[in-house]
Structure formats: structure tokens, C-alpha cells
Image (cartoon, grey):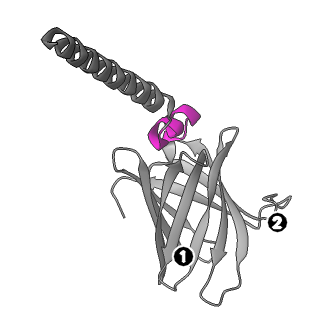
Amino acid sequence: MNRSKTTKIHTVLRNTILAGAAIVIILTVGAGGQQGLGGLVTMGGFEWLIGDWVATTDQGGEIHSFYKWDLNKNLIAMGFKMGEFEGCGMIYYEPAEERVVQIGVDNRGGIAKGYWDADGEKAVARLEYAPPDGEKRRMASVHSKVDAETMKVEFYDMDSDGWLSDEPRGTLEYKRQKKQT
């Protein structure tokens, strides 16, 4: 009888250890298969976007923008300021949707939501903006690297299916700043 109890205990312990090992292997393989935001940005070659940027409008005003890593490269904190108008947001990878998501708010109560993807060597943000008056607008901004110190951003109208207008409605050229603005 004691021998039977001992055998059952050993069997239970062995099965528990094997089950635990199987769970660890499954979780390790699953985690390795998941791609985080940092990996996606590196894989796409878009690390150049991270930094502090300034553009000058046709009217001579400045637009300050930044993209900064946070949370172990699982988040890009972002923001902009143009005169009295400013906003901030975040970009992150949503594994369930397999998409890079952006959400943001501005100091006038507007909310932006959308997705980022790559179009060749360009990073494209497709966003829906809801100002406080509730009239939603769809737009896209296409970011391209000119050189190590220069980024071009083209702004397009976007239809409900996500298609961009043929021509940009505006273009800005940003210069990289040495210190955070």
C-alpha cells in the first residue's frame, strides 16, 4: 500500500513537472513569435523617425514635433505644438489586430485614432480626427526620410476606405533638433 501511494505521488509530481515544462516551452515559443513595436520599427527601417523635429510653415510659424521611445520600446510617445495648438499621443503595437495603432488628444478637445503602416520606405499614419464639434475628418500623413537630419511629411485627404487623394494637400519639411523641444 505504501509503495502504491509513493508511486502515485511520483507519477503526479512527474506529470506536474512535465506539464509545467510544456507550459514554459509554449509561452517561450509564443513570446518569441510575437513582434513588439521596437522590433517592427527596426525591421521596417523607421528608427530615423525617433527624435525631436521642427518645421516652418509657409506663413513662417514653427511646428515642433517629437517621437520618443517609452516602456522598453513598446510605445512611442509623440506630440506636436504649433502656436497655441498642441497635442500628444501614443503609438503602440496591438497584437490582436496585428496593427500599429495611434491614439491622441489635443488641447482643444479633439481626438485622433488610427493606424500606421509602411509603404515602401515611407511610414503612413491613417487617422480619423474628431474635433469637439463632432465633425469627423479622415486624413493621412506620409513620413519619409530625406537624410539623417531631414524628414518630409505629406498630408493627404483620405476616403472612408482608407484610400489617399492623388495629391497631398500640404507638405512640411522637418529638421532634426539636437535637444528635445
Task: Classify 85 as above or below 98.
Answer: below
Is residue 148 among what the camera can see? no
Task: Classify 58 as above or below 19.
Answer: below
Q: Which numbered tag is attached to residue 159?
A: 2
Which residue is the site of mark 1? 61
Image quadrant assignment for residue 129: bottom right
Task: Classify 170 as above or below 85.
Answer: above
Task: Classify 1 as above or below 28.
Answer: above
In the image, farthest residue toward the bottom: 133
Residue flagged by tag 2: what amino acid is it? Answer: Asp
Q: Image quadrant for the C terminus?
A: bottom left
Q: x, y (%) of residue 64? A: 47, 67
Q: Nearer the viewer, residue 175 or 95?
A: 95
Q: Nearer the viewer, residue 163 or 50?
A: 163
Q: Which residues are magenta?
A: 36-47
In the image, farthest residue toward the left: 2
Residue plotted at (70% across, 38% down): 120
Q: x, y (%) of residue 27? A: 41, 30
